[in-house]
Amino acid sequence: MKFLNKLWRTGRRAREIGSARLHGGTPCGTCGFTGRPLHRNVLWPELVAAWELPPDWARWMDEREGSRCAWCGSSLRSGQLAGAIVTAVNARAGSIATSLSAVFRDARARGLQIAEINSAGNLHRYLKRCPGLRYSEFGSQQVGVPHEDLTQLSYADASFDIAITSDTLEHVPDIDTALREVWRVLKPGGAHVFSTPVVWSRATRQRATLHGGVLTHLLAPSHHGPPGTGQTDFLVFYEFGSDFTAHCTAAGFELTLVKHATNPAVVTFIATRPASG
Ligand SMILES: [Zn+2]
């Protein structure tokens, strides 16, 4: 029975990949596969209500996380993040890879110092091919997985060519301190490559503050991580809006936005510490 189930699943996967490939699309930044993504809904009603997302934005945010590469399973968001990391690596190492699965075959790319401040979904399995990777999790309580506090990183000044955060900045109590901390640990010319949800049609809302250890809720507590899953249950401090980019430039970064062709919620940020900074 187990064998039949496995055979059925393998057949279904082959059909999905074949059908996705027939429909074309944008190459996945993680694995390089070109094909239509598979989709399942991932946002839950309580989150959409707390976030007060207009219907279009609810759909775009759902697609951002729920549309996945038929080959490697990367979401639209993490596939785009992977592509932006490859761009940042190529620019610093002189490599010419087009996917994260290929980029660390180049010895020059393997020579970079990279901080994966929290794991970017299925990108970690490729990033760890880089000997200079320092991996941590935001809020890690797992033995053997170091925790990094974005408002107080443990790393020395000017340590990294690239720093990566994946949908984490909205959970940090003080966005300006966090961005300045990442700037501090980057080498001049280094880049912070990251994703964070931004609703570009409105201004940032702060849901909570943390001052001197005192947590104050300005709006009803909202968490990312579906209720009852026991997975990530991070409190949302910020629902970023169009003013988000001003925080990046105020922290001293030069900002490049990588955008999706049709979905305005799918944006990756490449924030560069100027070479003379
Ligand atoms: Zn892929």
Image (tube, helix red, strand yellow):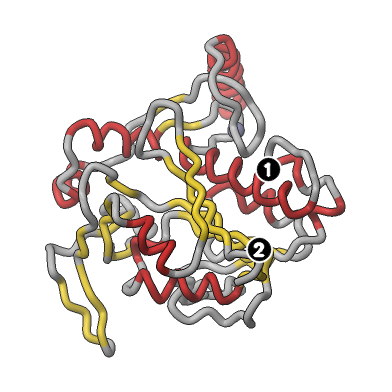
Q: Residues within 10 Å of mark 2 (few under 14, many from 20)?
A: some
Residue visible at 23% across and 75% down? 209
Frontmost residue, 255 versus 77: 255
Disc 2: residue Cβ within 8 A of ligand 1's nearest atom: no
Q: Is residue 45 left or right of residue 178?
A: left
Frontmost residue, 182 versus 277: 277
Name the residue type under label 2: Gly
Residue visible at 48% across and 71% down? 140
Q: CA distance from mark 1 to mark 2?
A: 21 Å
Tell me which corner region of the image, top left, top right, bottom left or bottom right, holds residue 207: bottom left
Q: Is residue 19 left or right of residue 161?
A: left
Residue visible at 71% across and 49% down? 91
Picture coordinates of residue 61, whole percent (x, y): 32, 39
Q: CB of mark 1 within 8 Å of CB of mark 2? A: no
Q: Is residue 219 left or right of residue 73?
A: left
Mark closer to the observer (1, 2): 2
Picture coordinates of residue 183, whole percent (x, y): 54, 71
Lower position in the chain sequence, tag 1 or tag 2: 1
Q: Residues within 10 Å of mark 1 (few under 14, many from 20)?
A: many
Picture coordinates of residue 232, whole percent (x, y): 38, 59
> Which residue bears the numbered disc 1?
100
Q: Is residue 274 above or below residue 226?
A: below
Name the residue type under label 1: Leu
Q: Quadrant of ligand 1?
A: top right
Outermost residue toward the front? 276
> Which residue bears the numbered disc 2?
189
SS of the residue at dot 1? helix
SS of the residue at dot 2? strand
Q: Is residue 75 above or below residue 191?
A: above
Picture coordinates of residue 205, whole percent (x, y): 20, 59
Tell me which corner region of the image, top left, top right, bottom left or bottom right, holds residue 9: top right
